[in-house]
Image (spheres, helix red, strand yellow):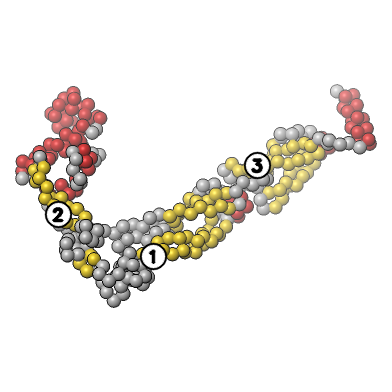
């Protein structure tokens, strides 16, 4: 009745205030009058989880059911029982070269799909689901409960039809009345060039089938990239090392540097030392939005470990010459 409704509103308002730190501080300072002057009813109830009110008080029904009881919205109506299918995840590993060029991969995805034999109804072809005699097709049953706050009508899922509103008397022989079957689907997925480690590719509608006509879920392909012995990657840039001889370092030279799409020529000035880094512009990874990163080449000057007598004598002569010019 009216008294129960007013008491419910008072309890709801108190909970909304006490569950919000700012509103509670205002209440402690100014009392109920301060809250009423500072906040409208819309402000008071904004953000409050009214399911918590009833859970905290020990009830197993939700705010929507109480709201419908007080205000008469949807009392006894049939609710929508469509359920979206689950999302799926598939991990795929490719090489750095694949990530550079882009690649189409073939995946075998085990998933739940709509039964073609019954078109997802779960009923044997030629038959149809029957209206549930317990809930009369609403998918819900009502139960009256007396509490300290009054009499409430609780609306719960029908236990006979599990909220479907229908009963399958003659199940489909293929899906056994489930409306879905397990299949392994072969799919081609195009991995774009420039993709990075851990990237998620979303294929809309390629996940599990929905229930009762619900939309299918999505398929998320997670891309992993193998370590490459030649290159290290940082974003769109690549890093590599190039070994050169002592004479090349001293005299300067032009060397060939391996890239992901072949080779490139790098001109080195005289006097190069180990650890010097040179940049080959545009020889890195492609960027998803266009363009390419750079390839950074670190020079490593090799010192010969074994020398012939002639080579040793020449180096000694070089050392004398260098010392004389200092």
For label 2, the residue is: 142
For label 3, the residue is: 239
Give SS at disc 3: strand
Label annotation for residue 137: none
**Position of residue 93 measured from the top left corner of the image (x, y, whole percent):** 56, 52
**Position of residue 325 measured from the top left corner of the image (x, y, whole percent):** 88, 25
Residue furthest bottom in the image:
126
Q: Earlier in the sequence, mark 3 or mark 2?
A: 2
Image height of 105 relative to 224, above or below: below
Q: Gap in Å between the C-alphas at discs 3 and 2?
A: 69 Å
Q: Residues within 10 Å of mark 1 (few under 14, many from 20)?
A: some
Q: Is residue 220 left or right of residue 288?
A: left
Q: Earlier in the sequence, mark 1 or mark 3?
A: 1
Q: Gap in Å between the C-alphas at discs 1 and 3?
A: 49 Å
Which mark lies nearer to you, 3 or 2? Answer: 2
Using the rendered view, name the quadrant where residue 208 is placed.
bottom left
For label 1, the residue is: 181
Camera sees residue 294: no
Between 63 and 317, the one lying in front of the other is 63
**Position of residue 247 measured from the top left corner of the image (x, y, whole percent):** 83, 37
Image height of 158 relative to 117, above or below: above
């Amino acid at each position: 009745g009216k008294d129960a409704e007013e008491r419910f509103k008072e309890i709801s308002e108190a909970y909304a205030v006490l569950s919000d730190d700012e509103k509670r501080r205002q209440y402690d300072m100014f009392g109920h009058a301060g809250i009423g002057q500072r906040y409208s009813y819309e402000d008071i109830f904004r953000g409050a989880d009214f399911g918590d009110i009833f859970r905290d008080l020990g009830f197993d029904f939700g705010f929507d059911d109480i709201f419908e009881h007080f205000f008469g919205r949807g009392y006894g109506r049939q609710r929508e029982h469509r359920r979206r299918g689950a999302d799926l995840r598939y991990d795929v590993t490719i090489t750095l070269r694949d990530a550079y060029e882009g690649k189409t991969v073939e995946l075998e995805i085990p998933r739940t799909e709509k039964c073609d034999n019954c078109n997802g109804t779960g009923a044997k072809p030629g038959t149809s689901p029957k209206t549930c005699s317990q809930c009369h097709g609403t998918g819900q049953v009502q139960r009256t409960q007396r509490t300290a706050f009054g009499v409430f009508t609780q609306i719960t899922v029908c236990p006979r039809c599990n909220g479907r509103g229908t009963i399958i008397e003659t199940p489909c022989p293929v899906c056994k009345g489930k409306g879905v079957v397990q299949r392994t689907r072969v799919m081609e997925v195009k991995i774009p060039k420039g993709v990075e480690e851990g990237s998620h590719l979303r294929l809309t509608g390629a996940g599990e089938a929905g229930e009762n006509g619900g939309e299918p879920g999505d398929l998320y392909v997670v891309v992993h990239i193998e370590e490459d012995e030649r290159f290290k990657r940082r974003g769109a840039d690549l890093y590599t090392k190039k070994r050169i001889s002592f004479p090349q370092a001293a005299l300067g030279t032009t060397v060939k540097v391996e890239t992901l799409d072949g080779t490139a020529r790098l001109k080195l000035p005289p006097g190069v030392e180990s650890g010097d880094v040179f940049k080959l512009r545009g020889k890195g990874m492609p960027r998803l939005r266009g363009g390419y990163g750079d390839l950074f080449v670190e020079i490593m000057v090799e010192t010969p470990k074994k020398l012939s007598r002639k080579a040793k004598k020449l180096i000694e002569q070089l050392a004398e010459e260098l010392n004389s010019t200092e």
